Amino acid sequence: MLDALALFLGMTLLYWCWEGSWWVYAVLFLAPDLSFAGYLGGPRFGAFVYNAAHSYMMPMALMTVGFALAAPLVLSVGMVWLAHIGFDRALGYGLKYAGGFGFTHMGRIGKP
């Protein structure tokens, strides 16, 4: 979990060095958790949507594109998204299995 904490702190520090707007950070930081709504479609669909929003692939792609095209907003979204993922993983919230929200690749969370 220390690696996840390092990701959260590193991306937040990078965002601060980048001089990004903290209002934007606050709004974007919570945005990936909207993927919880996927569980309205059942545990299998919910896990798919949640995992898509909490995978490193899309934010890393955004950061790459942001650097390549010198697009500050795209870069900011990628940084904040990675910070969110790091924060979640540091708290023990891993990628989900289809068995339900409490079954993650980092172990079971919540009440048994």
Image (cartoon, rainbow, N blue to C red):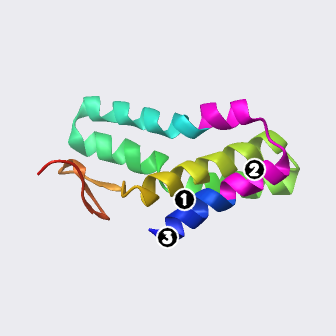
Nearer-N-terminus badge (2/1):
2
User: Which one is closest to the eye, mark 3 or mark 1?
Assistant: 3
Residue at horizontal 30%, vertical 40%? 46
Furthest residue toward right? 70
Q: Position of residue 76 (x, y in %)?
A: 74, 45
Q: Position of residue 25 (x, y in %)?
A: 67, 38
- Location of residue 106 by image quarter: bottom left
Residue at horizontal 53%, vertical 63%? 5
Residue at horizontal 24%, vertical 53%? 109
User: Which one is closest to the eye, mark 2 or mark 1?
Assistant: 2
Please say if 72 is above or below 14: above
Nearer-N-terminus badge (2/3):
3
Residue at horizontal 73%, vertical 35%? 22
- Disc 3 target residue: 2
Q: Position of residue 75 (x, y in %)?
A: 76, 48
Give the magenta part as a residue range. Answer: 11-28
Between 50 and 4, the residue placed more toward the observer is 4
- Mark 2 and mark 3: span between their CA atoms? 20 Å
How crowded pointer 2 is (Cα within 10 Å; few <14, some 14-19, many 20+) is rated as many
**Amino acid at circle 3:** Leu
Asked if labels 3 and 2 touch by Cβ distance under 8 angstroms, the answer is no
Question: Disc 3 on helix, strand or loop?
Answer: helix
Question: Disc 2 on helix, strand or loop?
Answer: helix
- Disc 1 target residue: 56
Furthest residue toward left? 112
- Mark 3 and mark 1: span between their CA atoms? 17 Å
- Location of residue 20 by image quarter: top right
Asked if labels 1 and 2 touch by Cβ distance under 8 angstroms, the answer is no
Looking at the figure, which quarter contains the N terminus? bottom left
- Mark 2 and mark 1: span between their CA atoms? 17 Å
Please say if 111 is above or below 67: above
- Disc 2 target residue: 15
